[in-house]
Image (cartoon, helix red, strand yellow):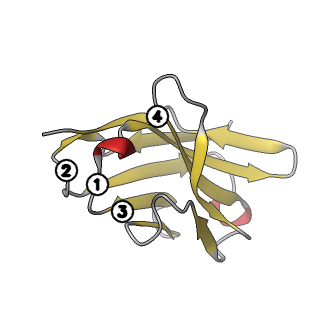
Amino acid sequence: QGQFVESGGGLVQPGGSLTLSCVASGFVFSSYYMSWYRQAPGKERESVAAETSPGGTINYADSVKGRFTASRDYATNTLFLKMNNLKPEDTAMYFCYAEAGPYDYWGQGTQVTVSS
């Protein structure tokens, strides 16, 4: 059974940075499309970064473009989301996600709070 273990969230001041990590296990990491989502209280879950093919080009939401960078490390089966110049509106629960055909896996979520 595949799974992700997420880490890296926390409280940060506006303008600060955080890096989220998701360690994958139990599935073929290189064969899955990877994405990052977030969900703020009272709002729908939204995509912030999504691969167009496994390990390929990444599309970013307009709200995070130029500030967030998603990447993956094949040696450690880890996804990363580097977040710079964080804003209060970035406050949300962040989730990593992998899909391939009928199979998909979600991380457990990690809270990011941007506040002074």
Q: Residue at x 47, y 68 (%)?
A: 65
Q: Which residue is mark 4?
A: 109
Q: Residues within 10 Å of mark 1 (few under 14, many from 20)?
A: many
Q: Which residue is mark 1?
A: 86
4 and 2 marks in contact (CB < 8 Å):
no
Alpha carbon distance from label 4 to label 3: 15 Å
Inspect the image, locate mark 1, and give the three-letter code of the amino acid beneath it: Leu
Q: Residue at x 60, y 43 (%)?
A: 46
Q: Which residue is mark 2?
A: 14
Vertical arrangement, residue 37 with respect to residue 68, above or below: above
Alpha carbon distance from label 4 to label 1: 18 Å
x and y, in percent, of residue 4 in the image: 53, 42
Q: Name, please, the residue furthest toward the left.
A: 116
Alpha carbon distance from label 2 to label 3: 15 Å
Q: Nearer the viewer, mark 3 or mark 1?
A: 1
Q: Residues within 10 Å of mark 2 (few under 14, many from 20)?
A: some
1 and 2 marks in contact (CB < 8 Å):
yes
x and y, in percent, of residue 95 in the image: 51, 41
Q: Which residue is mark 3?
A: 82
Horizontal side, residue 28 vs residue 86: left or right:
right
Alpha carbon distance from label 3 to label 1: 10 Å
Alpha carbon distance from label 4 to label 2: 21 Å
The secondary structure type at the circle numbered 4 is: loop
Q: Residue at x 29, y 63 (%)?
A: 84
Q: Quadrant of residue 81?
A: bottom left
Q: Nearer the viewer, residue 108 or 84?
A: 84
The quadrant the N terminus occupies is top right
Inspect the image, locate mark 3, and give the three-letter code of the amino acid beneath it: Lys
